[in-house]
């Protein structure tokens, strides 16, 4: 319990409207999009200015209150599930785009700006902000930075990390730390921005982000290729890359996902296909046409049974509709959806797809796999009902084995969803005891009272 | 009074529907209320989590949950955008009924819903008196819109700019009709709805004119009751069922081919809410409810799909009046009707349709929501007003009298000279030329 006097102090900082004390108001900040047990925080605060945010951090530190920063609460690893004695700090009151600079190609934003709104504002200026996580319609840029969010365009354009030029954040004392700059080049001091990106709120509280922008591609072309064998699809991916072509997106859907999408949206997908590849190339019109022709030839050479090249924007939309519908279509089949994101080097995708199929059989589970074939980031999606304890146990075993197999292939636990609390216990398996100790020493040095989102990524500091 | 354990047990009946929510949070993108407040308790994901908490006996006092559950426009934007297909509205109306059953209705709601709305004849009499005396209490504020506001300081109206009650409600202008099927071979029952009857009778007249033009015979019974949505959204199952049963008597399904309304909310209530709240009722009554609910159709959709009204390729004319169109949530999100009203406008020579930004963003009225949370409702309404104003159109059309009330209020508050019309009125006017 947080004392009345302390609640009053928070109210003085953020206003009475910005402090949620009621049981029902706190209960709705007990979860995120990960399938984990909810934990109700002791207090929720919603600052609307940087000064108030700093003072909230300071108050938490002085009173040793665990602090969990929350944007839209869409992460898939429990990173925003708070501590029962802790304070949830909402960033959606800090949602201004402070600057979009079309000459120097950068933008400055507050952490609560919604990703898709930002991308649209940037597009309005003829520029491009590529990271497009699946939750972009609601996710916040602060959350994207804290989770190092990815998306469909990772292969060619990279992930959030590649667009963070600089940050301003508050340390555990609530003091302002500045890192990076509005310039392309900047070697002034430690690259603290790199440390903060993906730190899931454990090392600082971000209040300002400088993001890199790039010119929007002039032209894009999409196609859908159908394969009778998964290996045909993965050989195509390898051959496209080997052919020195880097598509903007290169997405994969397995047979189960294809069937789910088809029964959901009747888009006319081939339900007996083993795999679909959805490919988009973008850039200068001449280069796009040339690359699209090459990609089409490679698909045929690798045994694609049919290829549909979108000629109009409408047809392009149609191609991507299948991909956009994938999660919805799968989600409608069972009450609980566990969206995994173990990632392997792209050349191992056929092995990983086979491994997931084998695991599904072994544990008698329904798993649909789709994802970013171009960057090796697949999303095996386990469909289950968390109320069925016996099946849930098998799900946990399956997840364990998916991790093992991905690691054995030189892969990683998480491509873009983060570690949060869902994967902390697997950290040592991928890294080493010393790695975790090193990270914990950093955490203890920067946050001696362990108030910044404790328990996430590295477990107990 | 039941115990919290019993309440939890009742809420658990919703469990199969509640578990479908995967907490992805995509409802944040479309919830008009969340767009105003940024509070998770205001968005569907939060409310579903609260109901789940209630079913797990997480709360000692359900009133907090109940209060937050009632802070909702029931616009259905979340359900229409939900990746996992959570039946949000079904859950919310059932949960409101469960909670109202547990806590009881407030005395005001009881008086209004049971004393007045539940008795159509009393309701008619009260509003007739209101129409007679409203001029004493209000004064006109906007000529174009025909709105009024309270004469002196604070009153029941607050700062609202209201569209006054019509001097003569529709049921007094035309009590009943029972025509033979016309040239179309179709006979349609017309469900007037309270707002059209008492505030916008011209919409009903336009609707009947259109039906007559297309050779559709009309069945218009007298003594119609409210569709029940105010009672359903307050969780007052008793009044809701009373109203539905009354309407079942007034509309014997074998007397007509289709049941039409010009009110998006009435159509959506009859189509979606009636069967849900009668699920556990007497099978015979449920069967009658389903029969009527299967027959109900929005008037725009009827004209397009049953009578083949199509846009005129020769339109729009150069001298046509630019008008914009607002999508009622209960038409677009609940019934998937959005192309049809636009087709009627494109078949109307006098106008040219100019789309506003986000035409399907909720107007913010939400019926009783606006009575209880006027500030929030107006905040959402202002966004809609700005979008209408940005088109430069002097007329905004829509397909729902409830949206018309909100548009009148918001445009009038902003001092705009923009008329609010029902799309069917525009279409009807053009039948003369």
Image: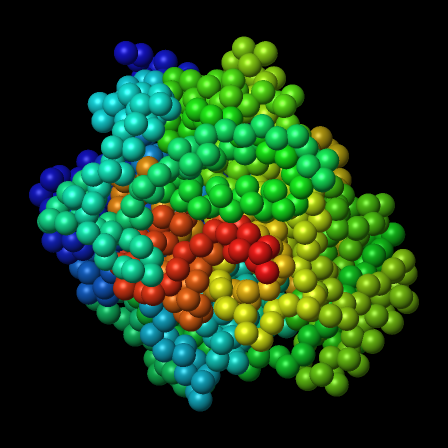
The residue closer to the viewer here, B313 or A323, is B313
Residue with the most extreme bottom position: A103
Residue visible at 55% across and 14% down in the picture: B285
Residue under the image location 55 percent in, 65 percent down? B350
Which image quadrant for residue A460?
Answer: top left
> How far across and how far down the image is residue A163, in percent?
48, 73
Q: Indicate left or right for B182 with B48 as reference.
A: right
Q: Residue at left 51%, top 47%? A: B206
Quarter of the image containing the C terminus of chain B?
Answer: bottom right
Residue A208 percent coordinates (x, y): 33, 70
Q: B5 and B259: which one is in front?
A: B259
Residue at x 29% of width, y 60% of height: B143
Quarter assignment of residue A343: bottom right
Looking at the rendered image, the quarter that the N terminus of chain B falls into is top left
Q: Left or right of B285: which side holds B133?
A: left
Seen in the picture, residue A254 relative to A283 is either above or below; the reply is above
Nearer the observer, A421 or B389 = B389
- Asked if residue B336 lies left or right of residue B197, the reply is right
Q: Position of residue A120 (x, y in %)?
A: 49, 69
Instruction: State how many labels appear.
Output: 0
Q: Residue furthest left?
A: A5
Q: Quadrant of residue B298?
A: top right
Task: Answer yes or no: is residue A346 visible.
Answer: no
């Amino acid at each position: 319990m947080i004392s009345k006097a302390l609640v009053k102090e928070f109210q003085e900082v953020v206003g009475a409207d910005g402090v949620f004390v009621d049981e029902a108001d706190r209960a709705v900040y007990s979860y995120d999009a990960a399938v984990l047990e909810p934990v109700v925080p002791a207090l929720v605060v919603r600052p609307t200015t940087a000064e108030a945010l700093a003072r909230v951090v300071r108050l938490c530190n002085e009173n040793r209150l665990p602090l969990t920063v929350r944007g839209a609460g869409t992460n898939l690893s429990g990173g925003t599930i708070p501590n029962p004695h802790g304070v949830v700090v909402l960033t959606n009151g800090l949602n201004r785009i402070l600057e979009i600079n079309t000459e120097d190609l950068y933008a400055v934003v507050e952490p609560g700006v919604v990703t898709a709104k930002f991308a649209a504002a940037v597009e309005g200026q003829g520029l491009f902000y590529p990271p497009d996580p699946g939750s972009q319609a609601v996710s916040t840029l602060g959350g994207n930075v804290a989770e190092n969010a990815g998306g469909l365009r990772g292969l060619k354009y990279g992930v959030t990390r590649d667009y963070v030029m600089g940050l301003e954040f508050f340390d555990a004392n609530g003091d302002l730390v500045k890192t990076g700059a509005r310039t392309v080049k900047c070697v002034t001091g430690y690259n603290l921005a790199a440390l903060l990106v993906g730190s899931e709120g454990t090392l600082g509280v971000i209040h300002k982000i400088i993001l890199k922008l790039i010119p929007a591609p002039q032209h894009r072309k999409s196609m859908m290729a159908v394969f009778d064998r998964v290996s045909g699809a993965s050989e195509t991916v390898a051959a496209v890359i080997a052919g020195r072509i880097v598509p903007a997106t290169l997405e994969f859907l397995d047979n189960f996902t294809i069937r789910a999408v088809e029964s959901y949206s009747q888009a006319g997908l081939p339900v007996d296909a083993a795999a679909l590849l959805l490919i988009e190339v973008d850039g200068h019109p001449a280069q796009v046409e040339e690359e699209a022709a090459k990609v089409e030839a490679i698909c045929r050479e690798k045994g694609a049974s049919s290829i549909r090249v979108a000629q109009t924007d409408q047809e392009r939309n149609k191609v991507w509709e299948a991909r956009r519908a994938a999660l919805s279509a799968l989600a409608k089949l069972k009450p609980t959806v566990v969206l995994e994101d173990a990632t392997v080097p792209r050349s191992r995708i056929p092995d990983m797809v086979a491994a997931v199929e084998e695991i599904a059989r072994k544990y008698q589970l329904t798993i649909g796999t789709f994802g970013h074939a171009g960057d090796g980031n697949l999303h095996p999606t386990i469909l289950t009902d968390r109320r069925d304890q016996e099946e849930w146990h098998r799900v946990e075993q399956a997840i364990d084995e998916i991790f093992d197999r991905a690691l054995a292939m030189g892969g990683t636990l998480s491509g873009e969803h983060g570690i949060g609390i869902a994967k902390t216990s697997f950290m040592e398996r991928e890294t080493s005891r010393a790695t975790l100790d090193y990270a914990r020493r950093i955490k203890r040095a920067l946050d001696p009272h362990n108030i910044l989102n404790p328990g996430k990524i590295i477990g107990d500091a | 009074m039941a115990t919290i354990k019993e309440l939890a047990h009742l809420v658990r009946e919703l469990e199969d529907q509640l578990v479908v929510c995967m907490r992805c949070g995509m409802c944040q993108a479309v919830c008009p209320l969340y767009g105003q407040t940024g509070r998770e308790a205001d968005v569907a994901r939060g409310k579903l989590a609260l109901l789940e908490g209630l079913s797990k006996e997480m709360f000692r006092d359900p009133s907090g949950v109940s209060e937050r559950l009632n802070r909702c426009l029931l616009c259905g934007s979340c359900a229409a955008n939900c990746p996992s297909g959570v039946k949000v509205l079904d859950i919310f109306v059932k949960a409101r009924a469960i909670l109202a059953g547990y806590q009881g209705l407030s005395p005001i709601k009881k008086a209004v819903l049971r004393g007045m709305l539940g008795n159509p004849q009393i309701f008619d009499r009260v509003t007739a008196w209101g129409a007679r005396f409203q001029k004493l209490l209000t004064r006109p504020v906007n000529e174009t819109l025909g709105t009024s506001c309270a004469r002196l300081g604070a009153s029941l109206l607050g700062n609202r700019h209201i569209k006054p009650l019509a001097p003569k409600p529709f049921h007094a202008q035309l009590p009943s009709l029972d025509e033979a099927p016309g040239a179309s071979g179709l006979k349609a029952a017309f469900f007037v709805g309270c707002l059209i009857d008492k505030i916008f009778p011209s919409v009903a007249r336009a609707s009947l004119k259109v039906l007559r033009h297309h050779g559709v015979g009309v069945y218009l019974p007298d003594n119609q009751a409210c569709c029940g949505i105010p009672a359903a959204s307050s969780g007052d199952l008793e009044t809701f069922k009373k109203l539905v049963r009354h309407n079942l008597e007034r509309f014997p399904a074998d007397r007509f081919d289709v049941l039409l309304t010009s009110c998006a909310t009435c159509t959506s209530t009859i189509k979606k809410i009636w069967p849900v709240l009668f699920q556990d009722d007497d099978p015979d009554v449920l069967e009658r409810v389903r029969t009527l609910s299967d027959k109900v159709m929005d008037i725009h959709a009827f004209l397009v799909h049953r009578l083949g009204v199509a846009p005129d390729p020769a339109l729009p004319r150069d001298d046509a009046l630019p008008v914009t169109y607002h999508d009622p949530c209960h038409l677009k999100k609940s019934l998937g009707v959005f192309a049809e009203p636009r087709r009627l406008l494109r078949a109307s020579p006098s106008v040219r349709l100019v789309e506003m930004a986000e035409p399907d963003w909720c107007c913010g009225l939400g019926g009783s929501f606006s009575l209880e949370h006027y500030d929030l409702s107006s905040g959402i309404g202002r966004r809609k007003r700005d979008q209408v104003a940005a088109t430069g159109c002097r007329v905004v059309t829509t397909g729902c009298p409830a949206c018309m009330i909100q548009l009148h209020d918001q445009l009038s508050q902003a001092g705009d000279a923009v008329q609010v019309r029902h799309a069917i009125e525009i279409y009807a006017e053009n039948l003369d030329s």
